[in-house]
Amino acid sequence: MNHRGNSLKNWLFGYVDAWDRFWFTPRQPCTLSVLRIITGLMLLYSHLVLATDLKAFVGDTAWVNNETARQLHDGTFGFSDYGRTYLWFISSPNLLWAHHLFTMVITACFAFGFLTRITSPLAWFLQLMYLHRLTGALFGFDQIVTYVAMYLMLAPTGSCYSVDARIRTRFASANRGRFWHWLFPEAKPTVLANIATRLMQLHLCVIYLFGGISKARGQTWWDGTAVWYSVSNYEYQSLDMTWLSGYPRLFSMMTHVTLFWELFYCALIWPRLTRPFVLAIAVFMHAGIAFGLGMITFGTMMIAANMIFISPEWVQHGLESLRRSSGSSRQSEV
């Protein structure tokens, strides 16, 4: 009996240790810092697109005006949610432009890693306000870039590949106070970097799982024609892929592989043996969406999101190799 009790205790403690290692093992912020650059640039691009015709997106004269946008969230049409934003109450075009310019400056600072501890949560918050205002004009890209920005603000993503890192290196001093070290953190393993990574990984697994379940409810994903209907749709077509009609087995295979991959992504992404194949399919599938269906921003952002499963050591080694190779090429040119 005592032996059984010890076995059960060891089994429980083993799972507790595994839980602690999964969530609280310090992690380098390199992968998150690269994601900060990509996400920040994507957010900046999104705001620049809004700026091309800002009055059509926000304000009282927008396609979906302030009052209608508010009613879509406050229960006027039967359903109330927490998608609130102060942009419902801004009517002045000058104030809207000032707010938008401020948003773009903050987002650019976030992308380039300037005062990231402050600009990271600000960039996410401002994006969320636009997200709640632009109901009816949103795309999958908007949700993906917002959730990635949300998790990035939890970690010290400005500790490397950033303006903050250059400031810390240039003005390094042992006499700096705690606020200085918080504002310009060192590029070292932290628990917060690991927590942000794990949350993002799990969120991505949930997205693919429910995407796969949704697809599995449709007949075309079982009869193998879903990919054909996608690439032959002229509304989204940016490359002529209608030649696939001559190879029904090919697009049928692509359909079933996509369905299997989405349904089992959450299980196959974790083992080191299967992870490279899962990530390779992710790159292939989202690149196809980007260039074949014209959804370049969405496809690019989804490929970037999958980077969260690449270890920071690999990212650091890859960037250092790239830097050395570019440096040697410059020397050879001289």
Image (cartoon, grey):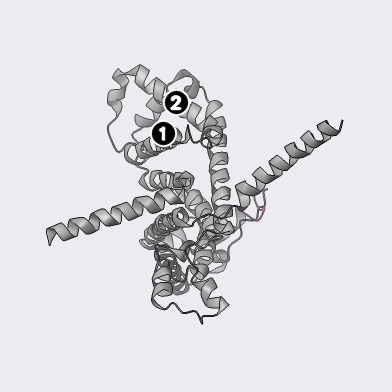
Identify the image quadrant of the C terminus. bottom left
Relative image position of residue 23 (x, y in whole percent): 62, 50
Q: Report, in whole angstroms, how far the alpha carbon at label 1 lies from the one at label 2.
A: 9 Å
The magenta segment is: 73-80
Disc 1 is placed on an element classified as helix
Q: How many marks?
A: 2
Q: Which residue is mark 2?
A: 257
Of pointers 1 and 2, the one earlier in the residue sequence: 2
Disc 2 is placed on an element classified as helix
* Image height of 143 relative to 216, above or below: below
Residue 245: mark in rendering: none
Relative image position of residue 169 (x, y in whole percent): 40, 73
Of the pair 169 and 98, the residue shown nearer to us: 169
For residue 86, what is the image quadrant? Answer: bottom right
Relative image position of residue 322 (x, y in whole percent): 29, 53
For label 1, count other residues whose C-alpha is less than 10 Å away and answer few (under 14), some (14-19) or many (20+): some
At 40% from the left edge and 35% from the top edge, which residue is drawn? 280
Looking at the rendered structure, the kind of residue marked 1 is: Ile
Query: What's the magenta bit mostly, secondary-structure-wise?
Result: loop
Looking at the rendered structure, the kind of residue marked 2 is: Val
Q: Which residue is mark 1?
A: 281
At 47% from the left edge and 45% from the top edge, which residue is drawn? 140
For label 2, count other residues whose C-alpha is less than 10 Å away and answer few (under 14), some (14-19) or many (20+): some
Identify the image quadrant of the N terminus. top right
Of the pair 78 and 170, the residue shown nearer to us: 170
